[in-house]
Image (cartoon, rainbow, N blue to C red):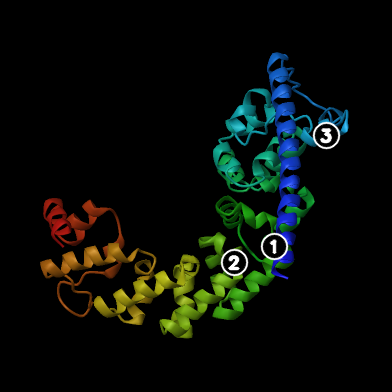
Amino acid sequence: MFGSAIRNIIIKNAQNAAKFKAIGAQCRHLRANRSTQSEADTLKPIAVTTKPNDKELEPTPQDSSAVALDFGNREAHVPSFNLAAYVNNSSTLQQLVSLGVDLHKIERRKGLGEFVLRLDFEKNIKPCLSFLADQGIAPDDFGRMITKNPLLFKEDIDDLQTRVEYLKSKRFSDEAIQRIFTQNPFWLMFSTKRVDRRLGYFQKEFHLSGHDLRLMATREPNLITYKMEHLRKSVFTLREEMGFNAKELQSLIVRKPRLMMIPPDDLVERFSYIHKDMGLPHSQIVQCAELLASREFRLRERHEFLKLLGRAQYDPQKDLYISPRTIVQGNNFYFVRNVAKSDLETFDLFLKTR
């Protein structure tokens, strides 16, 4: 019994060895064919086709052994994602550069470089620029708008005109419309129904009048097209975590709508420092909404410097009052000279020793 098992193992090993030997022979044969082929290729002149057609790109197998090692003819032209490489040969790109468009920023976003490269200036771009000019937008702003949103050229001119007429029907002034499109060219890609829903959301959520709604949208046009999920989180943070009541929240949003786009965790961190360390109540924070828009480390540096000088007095009913708004205004030189009433040398020494 034991002997028969041993014999079976020996037989299997012999069979496996025979298989391995056959496989090894096949591999050596393939390597020999490959080395012969590579030597022959090095002696052949390379013909590069600058404009290959579809038929030239298809592999043409000759026999079964060649097919096993043939991966087909490769396209000689390697796509470039650097639009600067095409400027010399593209009048459209040259026109865009003359308008002040930053091609480098466009090509960094997936797919936009190829999209811009396919545009025709007379057919796709010029009608849109004429439309913008008709809205009173200065040609100096064209480059920045296109850099931000080159997909604007995908929109139909009639649709763009409809979106302008919608804003006029909502009593947005011509100056407000110009600012909205200049600061946020993505607004032009939103349908009137979508914009109407967004404006309705803010008006209902914060109980805004028509005037306040227009003021908020004009001050921060990016807010209307921002991610709704983020906006809802910001509303929850301001109302539930920070404790602003409806009236305070309404005033805060109109005064500084950009607060809605700041990450909620950053808002909570800033509010905690302003409310607890600086001792400002909610009502005073609303009046100085700029504090929440400033970074926490900047607030901390300037408040602690004023505290060191004995000038951190933010109560308007007491002497030596300093408006909290002035803490975040201007550069360090302005702050030290006009608010802290000190000098830069003392402030720099304070920053090094804190």
Label 2: element kind = loop
Give the quadrant of the C terminus: bottom left
Q: Please state the horizontal and vertical placement of residue 279, each as a whole percent of the image.
A: 25, 79
Label 3: element kind = helix
Tell me what residue is drawn at x 33 percent, y 77 percent. 272
Q: Is residue 209 left or right of residue 154?
A: left
Residue 96 seen anywhere in this rendered image of the structure: yes
Eye-nearest disc, 2 or 1: 1
The type of residue carrying mark 3 is Val
Eye-nearest disc, 2 or 3: 3
Which of disc 3 and disc 2 is earlier in sequence?
3
Give the distance between the C-alpha atoms of the residues marked 2 and 3, in whole angstroms: 52 Å
Q: Is residue 54 left or right of residue 161?
A: right
Q: Please state the horizontal and vertical placement of residue 223, each as a whole percent of the image.
A: 55, 64
Q: Is residue 230 left or right of residue 344?
A: right
> Which residue in the protein does label 1 denote?
6
Residue 71 seen anywhere in this rendered image of the structure: no
Give the distance between the C-alpha atoms of the residues marked 2 and 1, in whole angstroms: 73 Å
Give the distance between the C-alpha atoms of the residues marked 1 and 3, in whole angstroms: 44 Å
Whether pointer 2 and pointer 1 mark residues with C-beta atoms closer than 8 Å, the reply is no
Which of disc 3 and disc 1 is earlier in sequence?
1
> Where, by quadrant of the figure, is residue 329 drawn?
bottom left
Label 1: element kind = helix
> Which residue in the protein does label 2 denote?
227
> Where, by quadrant of the figure, is residue 316 drawn?
bottom left
